[in-house]
Image: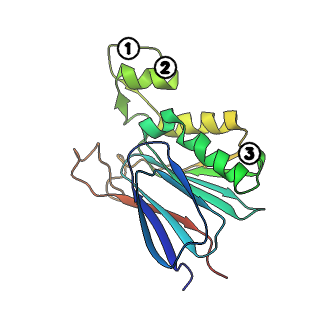
Amino acid sequence: ERFPTLVLSHQVHGAAVQWHEALPEGWLVLDGCDGHATTERGTLLTVTVADCIPVYLTVPQKGAIALLHAGWRGAADGVLARGVELLKWRGFAKASDIVMHCGVGICGSCYEVGSEVAVRFGMPASTAPVQLDLRAALVRQARQLGIEAVSVSPWCSAHGRDRFFSHRASGGRDGRIAAYLGRPKA
């Protein structure tokens, strides 16, 4: 079995990222965690999304990986910075060693937010809803954190409802997309 351990959590749209090592085989289900990181082979990290952005982080030279659930609250509260710090500290990496990919999520033209959210991302206060591109905000954060290798999925969960789930486009009736990242057991 290539992945004898599977890690997932009941996500809370926060910035908590947990480091995992020496885990038993089977499923580990946590509460209150929006990201996972490890260097362990055979551990499959998972998050679920339905407009939020799955953020994949890897340090190829060190074998460290992290998978984050980044909605607007987590992105504003620093879930990416927390994941990067864990990879630097526990994965013995430099920010410039980290490769990041923002997966399928809602695009800026489909994601309207109020002023209270917009100002958290450095946008001006407004009485009208504004468009927020979460992936672009995460890319800016990555650059500020020193990550140079960044890619972004071209797919929008709301535009691509024939392929993906979108909480916003479905009025909350859709399911979830499972994102996963792991290094198979040798």
Q: Provide the residue designation for mark 2.
A: 123
Of the two numbered discs 2 and 3 in the rendering, the one whose residue sits closer to the viewer? 3
Q: Earlier in the sequence, mark 2 or mark 3?
A: 3
Q: Position of residue 96 (x, y in %)?
A: 77, 46
Q: Is residue 107 above or below residue 177?
A: above
Residue placed most toward the observer, 59 or 16: 16
Residue placed most toward the observer, 123 or 19: 19
Residue at figure coordinates x 37%, y 36% from the top left? 110
Residue at figure coordinates x 76%, y 52% from the top left? 93
Counting labels gives 3
Q: Earlier in the sequence, mark 1 or mark 3?
A: 3
Secondary element under disc 3, as helix, strand or loop, is: helix
Q: Is residue 185 above or below residue 77?
A: below
**Amino acid type indicated by mark 1:** Ser
**Amino acid type indicated by mark 3:** Ala
Q: Provide the residue designation for mark 1.
A: 126
Residue 13 in view, yes or no: yes
Whether residue 45 sits left or right of residue 107 in the image: it is: right
Q: Provide the residue designation for mark 3.
A: 95
Residue at figure coordinates x 23%, y 47% from the top left? 172
Q: Position of residue 64 (x, y in %)?
A: 68, 61
Crowd rating for badge 2 (residues with CA inside 10 Å; few <14, some 14–19, many 20+)? some
Crowd rating for badge 3 (residues with CA inside 10 Å; few <14, some 14–19, many 20+)? some
**Amino acid type indicated by mark 2:** Met
Q: Pointer 2 and pointer 3: residues touching (CB < 8 Å)?
A: no
Q: Pointer 2 and pointer 1: residues touching (CB < 8 Å)?
A: yes
